Image: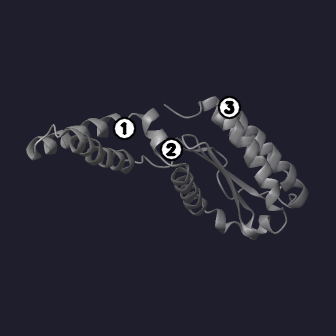
Amino acid sequence: MTLLTTTEQDQVAAAINAVERETDAELVTVLARQADNYAYIPLVWAGILALLVPGLINYFTEWFGAHTLLLVQWGVFLVLGALFRIPQINTMLIPRQVRYWRAANLARRHFLEQNLHHTKDGTGVLIFVSEAERYVEILVDQGVSSRVDNKVWEEIVENFTNQVRQGNTCQGFLDCIEACGTHLKEQIPATHERNQLPNHLVVLS
């Protein structure tokens, strides 16, 4: 299952095409389902609770012998390890700082993988979204950052993030691209026709 339908992805591509006809900036959009599977997080929590809970119960009640305590700890670990893999529970166990850190790393990796740092005059712009983390970031190359103040992107990102939280990711992309285009057309107007990078939405499922 795709994060956006084919029709919605086509709408995003069309919005990029419309903006790039009026600016020399190169826009690339990336949408990830999740920045990481966080497989280690459930195991860490299950391990901590498996050590602490049966141990504390036994400390106050002395219900278990050493052999039984070990078996109970293993049982708790296996049960919690499976339970914590349920996506809704898993998400609650992951600290926000960890989720944002992983999403930010993925955004920077794709800025490089999509060759946004190799555009002529340094006019690459990445619009990155990771849905599970409700994370949105706009990364720009030097040719753009030298002409457009970073506060401009912060306001656009804030609006887009609110739309992702509400489940309006497609409309968020369209509004974000239009808002970016308004500033890019003013500061980096089109001087000649070129298209160095793909305009379709890159989906990481």
Residue type at mark 2? Gln
Viewer-side label of 3, 1? 1
Compared to residue 189, the image places residue 159 above or below, namely above
The residue that label 1 is drawn on is: 85
Residue 126 drawn at (x, y percent): 67, 55
**Nearest to N terminus: mark 3 or mark 1:** 1
Q: Is residue 181 left or right of residue 45?
A: right
**Crowding at label 3, few (<14), some or many (≥20) Cα neighbours within 10 Å?**
few
Which of the labelled discs sits on residue 111, or is there none? Answer: none
The reply to whether the C-beta atoms of the residues labelled 2 and 3 are less than 8 Å apart is no
Examine the image and state in which quarter residue 11 appears: top right
Instruction: Find the distance from the CA under tag 2 to the CA under tag 1.
Output: 14 Å
Q: Is residue 168 left or right of residue 113?
A: right
**Crowding at label 2, few (<14), some or many (≥20) Cα neighbours within 10 Å?**
many
Instruction: Find the distance from the CA under tag 2 to the CA under tag 3.
Output: 16 Å
Which of the labelled discs sits on residue 168, or is there none? Answer: 3
Viewer-side label of 2, 1? 1
The residue that label 2 is drawn on is: 34
